Image: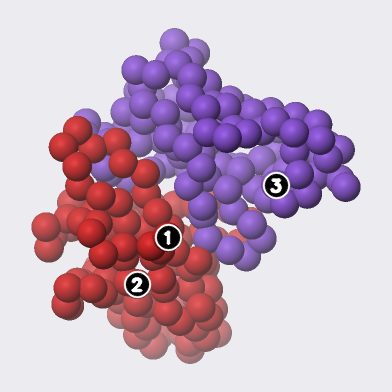
Chain colours: A purple, B red
Amino acid sequence: SQQGEEDPQALSIQEGENATMNCSYKTSINNLQWYRQNSGRGLVHLILIRSNEREKHSGRLRVTLDTSKKSSSLLITASRAADTASYFCATDASNFGNEKLTFGTGTRLTIIP
Amino acid sequence: EPEVTQTPSHQVTQMGQEVILRCVPISNHLYFYWYRQILGQKVEFLVSFYNNEISEKSEIFDDQFSVERPDGSNFTLKIRSTKLEDSAMYFCASSEALWGSNQPQHFGDGTRLSIL
């Protein structure tokens, strides 16, 4: 698989349920970021987790990072219709964490009202 | 909340023509980036720019591409002679330059470039 592969590719859940998306990567990283993209729009930054962090929370979002397995997960709790979007993980493998991001293939999340 | 703005939102150009995509990064940000997303594919890094010079570029960013920060606010991507395969959504991003870095990149809404 390539750097930054999300699974599942598509996920449909009922409103109110939790959604979990996973991301795997291949190289060592400085940080990993999650982004949301609504159809035809730009990428909205959700959360950044550093390589020395294991878990981070922001509102209804919870991100975990396991550098030994080179994987991350994004949990959205109590999903809402407005959460319908594509979600991407992106890794920064630079020394200082300000260089290029390598994006995954994304998970398309659909929240059913 | 400050945001990255891109113009135009949609650009249609004949193959072989030059095109300039414009971006206004967030005002206190010092790192700038261009990415592209071909329809149905991953977002791909093109180039990063810091301190008035390119800090990294991908294989996609060949001699047909150039970037410039012509004044204190704009950041442009120029494609000299467009090809059909340049059709994509082009995203500009910016991030702060803080010691220790690890700053998120903030993206604009993109310019959809269609080459005919």
Left or right: B48 with respect to A77? left
Mark 1 chain: B
- Residue at 52% from the left image edge and 27% from the top image edge: A57
Residue A54 on image: x %, y %: 45, 16
> Residue at label 3?
A83
For marks 2 and 3, give the CA distance. Answer: 27 Å
Query: What's under tag 3, amino acid-wise?
Result: Asp
- Above/below status of A100 relative to B19: above
- Above/below status of A36 relative to A27: below
For marks 2 and 1, give the CA distance. Answer: 17 Å
Mark 3 chain: A
Q: Nearer the viewer, residue A78 or A10?
A: A78
Residue B59 on image: x %, y %: 32, 53
Mark 2 chain: B
How many neighbours does mark 3 have within 10 angstroms: few (below 14), some (14-19), or many (20 or more)? some
> Residue at label 1?
B1
- Residue at 23% from the left image edge and 73% from the top image edge: B73
- Residue at 83% from the left image edge and 40% from the top image edge: A15
Query: What's under tag 2, amino acid-wise?
Result: Cys
Quadrant occupied by the N terminus of chain A: top right
> Residue at label 2?
B23
Marker disc for residue B96: none
How many neighbours does mark 2 have within 10 angstroms: few (below 14), some (14-19), or many (20 or more)? many
Q: Secondary structure at mark 2?
A: strand
